[in-house]
Amino acid sequence: MRALLALFLDIALLRRGPQDVPASRLLAGLALAAYTLAGFGLLAVTMPLPTAAAQTVLDVVLLAAFMRLMLASPRLRSRFLQAFTACTGTGALFALVALPLAFWPHPASLDSTEALLPALLYLGLLGWSVVVMGHILRHALSITRGLGLVYAFVYLVVSVLAMIALFPQVS
């Protein structure tokens, strides 16, 4: 277990890539379960449980579909399991790191300087998660770092737009 955490941490720190993740359905399932639970836990702090559950399901479906689409060519299909496991494993870590920020007092109850810190920390974490996804895509697709970042940013935009379109009542 410790070795897996170290592996996902190394990927999140850009020291290793998805090619270092064992191609195991069991590991993919465990990483997906951790990603789903951590993501749900993060969302459940700030919204009703049914909405948090629905957004978590949408997030998982979007991530799986995006990775399938990106790795759809015959020469890349075999990389899906490792890349998806790397995304879900590091995504679970990001959600756990973001959890304390969800418990920060609501910005409306803080003055502007107190509200700035959690917002900046969350934005930094979001930015780093895009960099990590770009890193994973770069290795999985054998593309440049810049193109990996572009694809990761496109995924972020599509994901945010889908959440806004399907859950307009959540602010």
Image (cartoon, rainbow, N blue to C red):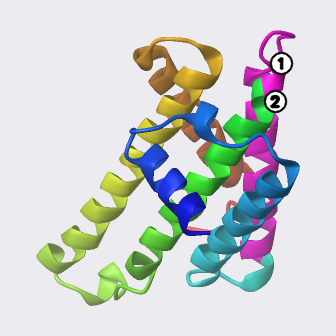
Residue 78 percent location from the top left of the image: 82, 24
Residue closest to the eye, 15 or 123: 15
Given the image, on which type of amino acid does mark 1 rest?
Ala
- In the displayed orientation, state which residue is furthest to the left: 113
155 falls in the magenta region: no
Do the residues under discs 1 and 2 have CB atoms within 8 angstroms?
yes
144 displayed left or right of 38: left
Residue at label 1? Answer: 72
Residue 131 percent location from the top left of the image: 42, 37
Question: Which element carries disc 1, helix, strand or loop?
Answer: loop
59 falls in the magenta region: yes
* Tag shown at residue 127: none
Residue at label 2? Answer: 68
Q: Residue at x 47, y 77 (%)?
A: 99
Residue closest to the eye, 109 or 7: 7
Quarter of the figure that contains the C terminus: bottom right
Residue 170 percent location from the top left of the image: 63, 69
Question: Which element carries disc 2, helix, strand or loop?
Answer: helix
Magenta residue span: 51-78
